[in-house]
Image (cartoon, rainbow, N blue to C red):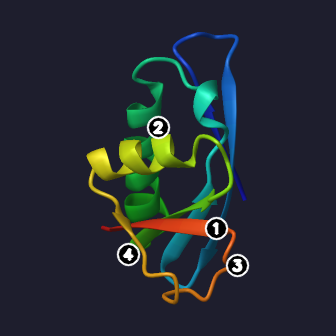
Amino acid sequence: MAIISRSIDPQRVNLWSAFTLDTILFFQPPAYNAWVDDDFRTCILAILELAENRLSCEKVVVCLNKHSPDAADFVKALMYVGFELCHPKAYEQNQDFLLVGYEL
């Protein structure tokens, strides 16, 4: 599944890779530097609403490459809106990825 978010700036479009497993929406956001001002928070809130209201998910998990230079910025921004780091063994993910989750 792909989630497309449009920016306030009509020239900018962000593509999110996503999939659902049981009642969990997993997604990987575009690069952190692709965001303009408040677009990030607005998009995250819209994805939470999509997951809960349209997809009937109970959790949302963001997958971040831990070697990415913007991983720390993403984690900080996500924790600001209520996400928490997932234990590395929670989903048995590749060790190159950080998972940040939110219970709906």
The image shows residue 31 at horizontal and vertical percentages of 66, 37
Query: What element does badge 1 sit on?
Result: strand
- Which callout, 4 or 2, points at the residue further toward the start of the chain? 2
Q: Which residue position holds label 4? A: 58
Query: Could you tell me the amino acid type at mark 1?
Result: Phe
Instruction: Tell us which disc is closer to us: 1 or 4.
Output: 1
CB-based contact (under 8 Å), mark 1 and mark 3: yes
Query: Could you tell me the amino acid type at mark 3?
Result: Asn
Q: Which residue position holds label 1? A: 97
| Residue drawn at (64%, 67%) of the image | 97
Query: Could you tell me the amino acid type at mark 2?
Result: Cys
Instruction: Tell us which disc is closer to us: 2 or 3.
Output: 3
- Count of number-bearing discs: 4
| Residue drawn at (69%, 69%) of the image | 96
Mark 1 surroundings within 10 Å by alpha-carbon count, few (fewer than 14), some (14 through 19), many (20 or more):
some
- Which callout, 1 or 2, points at the residue further toward the start of the chain? 2
Q: Which residue position holds label 2? A: 43
Query: What element does badge 2 sit on?
Result: helix
Instruction: Tell us which disc is closer to us: 1 or 2.
Output: 1
CB-based contact (under 8 Å), mark 1 and mark 4: no
In the rendered image, the quadrant that contains the N terminus is bottom right
Q: Which residue position holds label 3? A: 94
Query: What element does badge 3 sit on?
Result: loop
- Which callout, 4 or 3, points at the residue further toward the start of the chain? 4
Q: Which mark is residue 39?
A: none
The image shows residue 45 at horizontal and vertical percentages of 37, 44
